[in-house]
Amino acid sequence: MAAGIHIGRRHVHGALLSRQRSRWKVETLARVALAQPLFEGVSDQVAEAGLVAALQQVSAGFKQGFMPIRIALPDTVIRSSVFELDDLPRSPKLQQELLRWRFSKTLQRDEDTFVCTGQPLGAAGDKQLLFAQALEKDWYAMTQRALQQAGIQPWSLNAQSAYQHNVYRDACEHGSGALISVDMETWGFQLWDSARRLRYVRSRWREGALDFEWISSEIERVIRSQASAAQGFQVERLHIAGGGQEVDALQQVLNRNLHQQVHLLPLPGINPEAMLASTDNGFNPAVLTAISNEN
């Protein structure tokens, strides 16, 4: 059994799956709308109470006992960057200080407002790469309290892009690449190099219908920018993930504008209909979260 919960700005998704040989069977899918949006301004008790109630509802079908429950937050909330450094910090304390300082400069916020984590990626030329993530302390603490109050002990809490990178890791075997992802609240974009290291992660909240032409031009701009910043870097393959007619339409626009075939990535071991929530045929991102590291 594997369970996943995706906490968005306006909705919380849940998914419970069981393994049957090499395939996954979806046991339950749930989606709960939040009365008060999350991740806007400062958290308050009303938002926290709403999140607790939503978490309890989407996890109602989860069985008690040992079962990994993975929690995903949008990449619009957990900011990711790859820093190129002359030398890596020698201790975890120095690494935290460096990351808070770098994110405070990037995001124009005080250093003590972030919770940061970093993972060395190795060398690129004469530089050391450090993959870093930052989440506002206020929202991190509120999320942890809400999970505890809902009776959920998370196996992991990470950005959705991290789970995507794990689930679609076979796509990385083909060399450097890019993944465009779409769900009901965000669209995102990540790049990795030929060593399968994430080099760029960004996501944006969406308001209504997607502007396919603007997304296409933005992706092209980022790819060119990364190629210019990292000498010799190029994207060998483009991929797209998600479900529904929007993904098909965006794929067609990208194929036309980027002059390169964009490959649709299915969730491994899952029938296509399992990607869709039964309520409104909207993509349920908690399915991907649940099976991360389970394939």
Image (cartoon, rainbow, N blue to C red):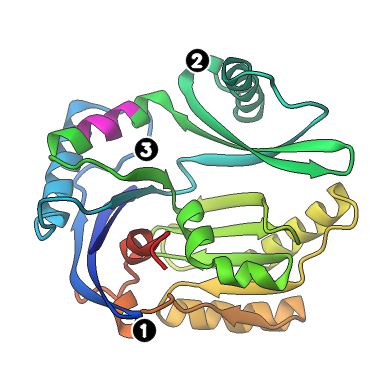
Quadrant in which the C terminus is drawn: bottom left
- Expressed as whole percent of the image width and height from the top left, the position of residue 156 reads 36, 44
Front: mark 2 or 1: 1
Quadrant in which the N terminus is drawn: bottom left
Between discs 1 and 3, the one toward the N terminus: 3
The magenta stretch spans which residues? 141-146
For the residues marked 3 and 2, what is the alpha-carbon distance in whole angstroms?
18 Å
Q: Secondary structure at mark 1?
A: helix
Q: Which residue is mark 3?
A: 39
Q: Which residue is mark 2?
A: 112
Using a 10 Å C-alpha cutoff, classify the residue at mark 1 as few (fewer than 14 neighbours), some (14 to 19) or many (20 or more).
Answer: few
Q: Quadrant of residue 172?
A: bottom right
Q: Secondary structure at mark 2?
A: helix
Q: Which residue is mark 1?
A: 272
In the depicted structure, whether residue 291 falls above or below residue 102 = below
Between discs 3 and 2, the one toward the N terminus: 3
Q: Is residue 46 left or right of residue 22?
A: left
Viewer-proximal residue, 51 or 16? 16
Amino acid at the residue labelled 3? Phe
In the depicted structure, whether residue 170 falls above or below residue 8 = below
Viewer-proximal residue, 76 or 169? 169
Amino acid at the residue labelled 1? Pro
Front: mark 3 or 2: 2
